[in-house]
Image (spheres, rainbow, N blue to C red):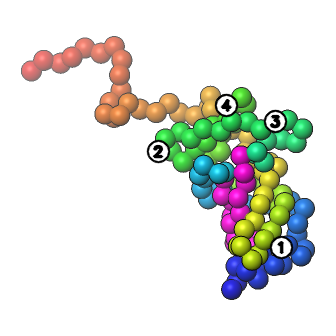
Amino acid sequence: LRHFLVLQYLEAEKVGDEVPGVITGFNSAGVWVMLDQFLVDGMVGWDAMGTRGTRPDRWTEIEGTGRLVAARSGAVLSIGDPVTIQILRVDPANREMELALTSHPNRKASSLPRPRPENGRKRGKGRRRRR
């Protein structure tokens, strides 16, 4: 009931507003963001992930890290990142909220640490020890 009432309030008072949120997950449809002030989740579709006036970037998942990387810009989004979103549409009857990403942390893929090999060892030029 609380979720429904919050969505009703957002539909009546906040559509078009920009509010802070936190990325809570992602799937094939887009990124899930929880609004800080209202504690409800909404979906940012892949087409609403770019900046205004530019075409949407293609986002790919870095397996096992909870991160997404944009193909053109190299921007990185992680679960738990603070973002600013705009509320585009609210449908309380279906418990849905459509959002657009307006700002995110300025982090690039080139600044991420490189993943270690699967066996957990560093690879390189090293001498093998004999026993």
37 inside magenta stretch: yes
Hey, what amino acid is under mark 4? Ala
Q: CA distance from mark 1 to mark 2?
A: 34 Å
What's the residue type where badge 2 is placed? Gly
Q: Secondary structure at mark 1?
A: helix
Residue at (85, 35) in percent of width and height: 54
Decide: marks 2, 4 in contact (CB < 8 A)?
no
Residue that carries the numbered disc 1 in the rendered image = 10
Q: Say which residue label 4 marks.
A: 71
Instruction: Compute the Cα span from label 3 to label 2.
Output: 28 Å
Ranked by sequence position, the earlier of labels 1 and 2 is 1
Q: Nearer the viewer, mark 3 or mark 4?
A: 3
Q: Residues within 10 Å of mark 3 (few under 14, many from 20)?
A: few
Q: Secondary structure at mark 4?
A: loop
Which quarter shows the C terminus?
Answer: top left
Residue at coordinates 36% horizontally, 17% vertically from top-left? 124
Q: Earlier in the sequence, mark 1 or mark 3?
A: 1
From the image, tell me which residue sits under label 2: 64
User: What is the C-alpha distance between the residues marked 2 and 4?
Assistant: 18 Å
First-in-chain label (3 vs 2): 3
Please report the bounds of the magenta region as a residue range.
Answer: 31-46
Residue 109 falls in which quadrant of the image? top right
The mark that comes first in sequence, 2 or 4, is 2
Q: Main secondary structure of the magenta part?
A: strand
The quadrant in which residue 68 appears is: top right
